[in-house]
Image: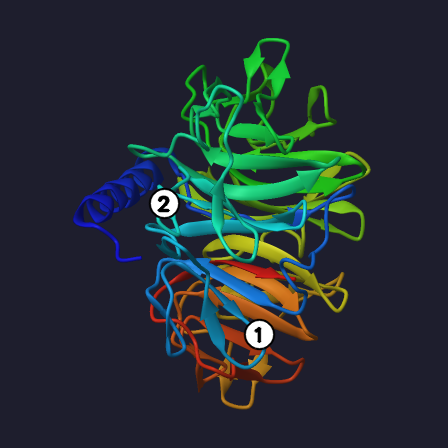
Amino acid sequence: MKVSEKSMSNGAARRLLRAVAQAVLGLIVVVAGTVVLPGSAAASDAIPGGKLFAGGHFTQAGQTVATSIAAWNGVDWSALSGPNGEGADETVDAMTMYNGKLIAAGSFMEAGGVVVSGIASWNGTTWEPLVGSSGAIGVVVRPLGFVTSLAVYNGDLYVGGSFPRAGGVTVNNIARWNGSDWFALPGPAGVGTEYGGAVSAPVWDLTAVNGQLIVAGLFTTAGGVPANSVAAWNGSTWSSVDQPIQGATVLAVENYNGALVASRAYSENNFSVNDVAVRSNGQWSALGGQPGGRLNGDVRDFTVYNGLLVAGGQFTHVGGVVVNNVAVWNGSTWSALSGPSGVGTDDGVFAVTPHAGFLVVGGFFDNAGGQPASKIARWNGSAWSALPGGGVNDNVFSLLST
């Protein structure tokens, strides 16, 4: 579906707001890690396995017209087209599977020509909104809201981002969908996340560790419980996980070998600091130590590939190691993904996922390992290559393997 002048204007305003937030509050726009947790649904007959879905802000995938979302079958690309149109009219930032359907979320108002407001389900044939019992559709993304993260936990779909309401319910940046209605995540003194009493407190990422849903972003309380940008939800109550750095933005989180790993951006002695920290036995420490484990930019997404922790983002070095936007942690050291013609990618990586034995990355880049690869590439363990069928013509913010 062609993006209207109105939706482009709103999208430009939303991106400007994010840029201002970065400058004023240290917010970093994150492509949230999309996770499927115990109790979730796997790919169904409606959405066959073996496909890779790419979401972002593009109009073409390979030789196929595809607006902001497309599917790759290992050979070529296809659009997600319904009776009223295809794709989404603004950015797709997160995807997951829920109850046998693909869930896509971001800053769009329409998917396949259907009004959905920030989040929609795809059943293999048509796009559908997630409508609450009040009749309200999706989450509030106008004028400047967005969804950045999705997770399926204890059989329900959790949605994180920057939005005040979902299905007409006041939720403050995180909401739960049970398949038929929307709910807030309440605590002893409020719902959702706040920063110093203000509800402008985005949730950037979600994952699960030790049976709890981990919620990460930039906030000082979750449900009224004090929390430095990371909190845990057990299905009924909030708790802190004692992230020690006040004011840190936690950009991405991952479960790595049963431990919580988090990407942090903060200020120290008036200098910007980025690191990847692990919480083990209730204690936090930086992977690779301090300052040796520090990065010179942001980690935007994590995944686990062949037992390695993979970090993608906008950085060129970890400690003294040149890595160029993708780095792997083997349990003791950071290293680059180097091919015969180069290291990493030539611009930022916003999404990483295993798929069909490969590591697939998406982002802003045009080359990976020195090889041409338009915004999406794969790594086979020794070399980089483009996807058969080509890449996409603009930025990728999310990937999902089914």
Looking at the picture, how far across and down is residue 184, in whole percent? 57, 21
Looking at the picture, how far across and down is residue 1, in whole percent? 31, 57
**As shown in the figure, which amino acid type bears the numbered disc 2?**
Glu
Tags 2 and 1 touching, CB below 8 Å: no
Numbered disc 1: secondary structure: loop
- Between the C-alphas of marks 2 and 1, the distance is 25 Å
In which quadrant is the C terminus drawn?
bottom right
Quarter location, residue 243: top right
**As shown in the figure, which amino acid type bears the numbered disc 1?**
Asn
What colour scheme has been applied to the protein in the rendered image? rainbow
Q: Residue at position x 52%, y 26% from top?
A: 132
Crowd class of label 1 (few under 14; some 14 to 19; many from 20; radius 10 Å) = some
Q: Which residue is mark 2?
A: 110
Crowd class of label 2 (few under 14; some 14 to 19; many from 20; radius 10 Å) = many
Q: Which residue is mark 1?
A: 73
Can I make out residue 312 in this image? Answer: no
Can I make out residue 283 in this image? Answer: yes
252 left or right of 69 in image: right
Q: Residue furthest top?
A: 189
Numbered disc 2: secondary structure: strand
